[in-house]
Image (spheres, helix red, strand yellow):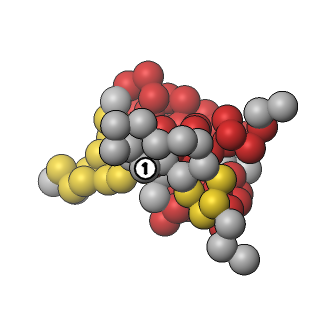
Amino acid sequence: MSRSISRPAKSGDRSDLPAESVAHLCKALGHPARMVIIDYLKANNDCVCGRIVEQLPLAQSTVSQHLKILKDSGLIQDTSEGSARRYCLNRPLMTRLKHSLAELLQT
């Protein structure tokens, strides 16, 4: 099954994602803590792990697990800054997901 959920491309923009990718990304977003993390990164562009931990009533190790799931899905990216990790949204992928979901949910 390799159906795509897509919208018409504009000026060379290819925003369709295969249905399997949309499902995988939605699964990665399928926990309230991960939604808080995404929302926080959306507002703060990039951030060290400790700041993200402060946003949630969870242990650092639990937040790290949620960050790993989001990173493995491709929704967030990280960079090394000394011993700290900085996280940011993968904005192009988020845009593609937004358009794919909008197409799917259009009535």
Residue occupying the point 54% across, 52% down: 16
Q: Could you say where residue 42 lies in the image, as x and y percent from the top left?
A: 45, 29
Along the viewing direction, whichever of 28 and 36 lies nearer the viewer: 28
Name the image quarter holding residue 100: top right
Give how far across and how far down residue 41 sits, in percent.
Answer: 44, 33
Give 107 or 40, whichever is nearer the viewer.
107
The part of the image, by quadrant, that contains residue 107 is top right
Q: Let me know if residue 64 appears in the view.
A: no
Whether 57 is drawn above or below 77: the answer is above
Query: 10 Å neighbourhood of mark 1: few (<14), some, or many (≥20)?
Result: few
For label 1, the residue is 14
Residue 86 in the image, given as x and y percentages of width and height:
29, 45
Which residue does the image show at 56% across and 57% down from the upper left?
Answer: 17
**Which residue does the image show at 38% across and 25% down from the upper left?**
44
- In the visual, does 2 lie left or right of 8? right
Q: Quadrant of the N terminus?
A: bottom right
In the picture as drawn, the residue positioned furthest to the top comes out as 43
Residue furthest to the left in view is 82
Task: State left or right for residue 25 relative to residue 85.
Answer: right
Where on the picture, by quarter, is residue 58? Answer: top right
Vertical comparison of 38 with 82: above or below: above
- The answer to whether residue 19 is visible is yes
Does residue 76 appear to the left or right of 16 in the view shown? left
Count of marks, rendered view: 1
Query: Which amino acid does the dot numbered 1 rest on?
Result: Arg
- Given residues 33 and 6, the one toward you in this image is 6
Expressed as whole percent of the image width and height from the top left, the position of residue 67 reads 50, 53
